[in-house]
Amino acid sequence: DARVTQTPRHKVTEMGQEVTMRCQPILGHNTVFWYRQTMMQGLELLAYFRNRAPLDDSGMPKDRFSAEMPDATLATLKIQPSEPRDSAVYFCASGFTGTEGEKLFFGSGTQLSVL
Amino acid sequence: TQLLEQSPQFLSIQEGENLTVYCNSSSVFSSLQWYRQEPGEGPVLLVTVVTGGEVKKLKRLTFQFGDARKDSSLHITAAQPGDTGLYLCAGRFIIQGAQKLVFGQGTRLTINP
């Protein structure tokens, strides 16, 4: 089965360190999303790409977060410098537009703990 | 303020019982999706509803979209322990001129054997 692959699965780091999360979307999907999930806020959209072009990053704190798609097989989310409030599970999803609208397929997430 | 409100937040019932969870908004969705998420995994898409009043069935799960496209429900018949998980609804809205998929906080469902 094709699936979205995220690495690393877990990351523990100290405040101020750079964190890079990677995502391999499903081949043939033309959209990529980054979401953050916490108990308090639920799933929040951070960034959205279509055909590798960034379309929406309004949910992302731009002073410390950046999202890129250097090629069709790789999406990255960087946090620099990281802060304890960034602790969350970060999900990447890829998708395509079908007859019923957009279908998203999520990876298993990166559990980030910033100490 | 959440655009989408899901209720109840938590639900724990015995195997074999029926249940309904709800997803409500004061805004009109252009479409609505239901996802199930298990611990340590990402959400998995169950269904998309598009038309007001639409009803879709997936084995023991029945999904309904409200006539006004502002609410949806998920009904599970004869719940089984394998149905345990976080059920998320996600509505597509026009926000500041752009289409966005917004998730509710979820209903955490536990089915006890």
Image (spheres, coloured by chain):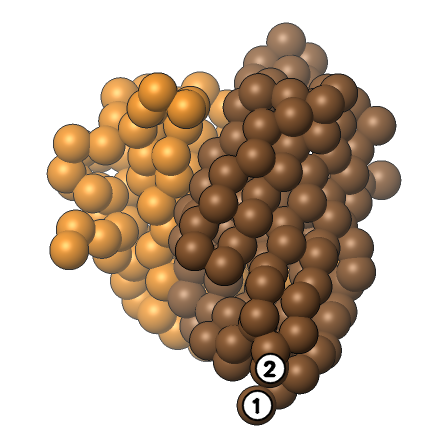
Chain colours: A orange, B brown
The answer for which chain carries disc 2 is B
Pick whichever, B53 or A25, lies toward us.
Answer: B53
* Marks 1 and 2 in Cβ contact (< 8 Å): yes
- The image shows residue B61 at horizontal and vertical percentages of 52, 54
Q: CA distance from mark 1 to mark 2?
A: 5 Å
Picture mark count: 2
Observer able to see residue A61: no
The answer for which chain carries disc 1 is B
SS at badge 1:
loop
Please state, as top left, top right, bottom left or bottom right, where the N terminus of chain A lies in the image.
bottom left
Q: Residue at x 68, y 13 (%)?
A: B96
- Disc on res. B113: 1
Q: Amino acid at mark 2?
A: Glu
SS at badge 2:
loop
Left-right relation of A38 to B5: left
The residue beneath circle 2 is B15
Q: Please, which residue is most extreme toward the bottom here?
A: B113
Q: Is A64 above or below relative to A29?
A: below
